Image (spheres, rainbow, N blue to C red):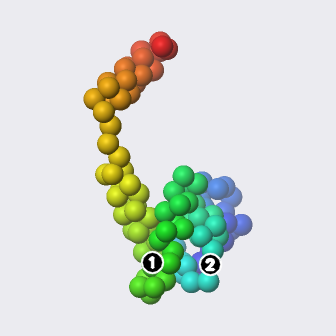
Amino acid sequence: MLKKRSDFESDLDYKKYTRSHEFLANYDITGKTPEQIQIDMCIDEDWFPYVQKALPILLEQQRITAYHMHWEVEKLADADEEAVTYTPEQIADAEQRYRDRKSGSSS
């Protein structure tokens, strides 16, 4: 039987549990909303669109564990990252901001 958030002293302890084999292998996404899955699995809010996209795909394929959801969400996020392209100017600007933050100065 899966543990619940209330079984843990802190949210961090619960989040660690959601990364355990016990949770990932036994959590069933069937009948759950994307919002409920995102909360139950402690998936970052920025990744919620991927949960929404992944849910119907996984249900159709009858891949219903948290392992499957994590894998599909990561796959969709990686595909989005690969589709993003940056100009040399954007890269140079980001590198300069990083150097400025590292040195403690601001632009």
Taking 19 as reference, is 6 left or right?
right
Q: Position of residue 44 (x, y in %)?
A: 55, 55
Kind of residue indicated by mark 2:
Lys
**Which quadrant of the figure contains the N terminus?**
bottom right
Give the quadrant of residue 67: bottom left
The residue indicated by pointer 1 is 57
Q: Position of residue 7 (x, y in %)?
A: 68, 68
Taking 34 as reference, is 102 left or right?
left
**Up-down: is 33 above or below 78?**
below
Return the residue found at the far left: 88
**Up-down: is 42 above or below 61?**
above
Tell me what residue is drawn at x 47 percent, y 71 percent. 54
Is there any visible trace of residue 43 in the rendered image? no
Query: In the depicted view, which residue is nearer to us: 38 or 14?
Result: 38
Q: Position of residue 98 (x, y in %)?
A: 40, 24
Residue at disc 1, secondary structure: helix
The residue indicated by pointer 2 is 32
Kind of residue indicated by mark 1:
Ile
Is there any visible trace of residue 84 in the rendered image? yes
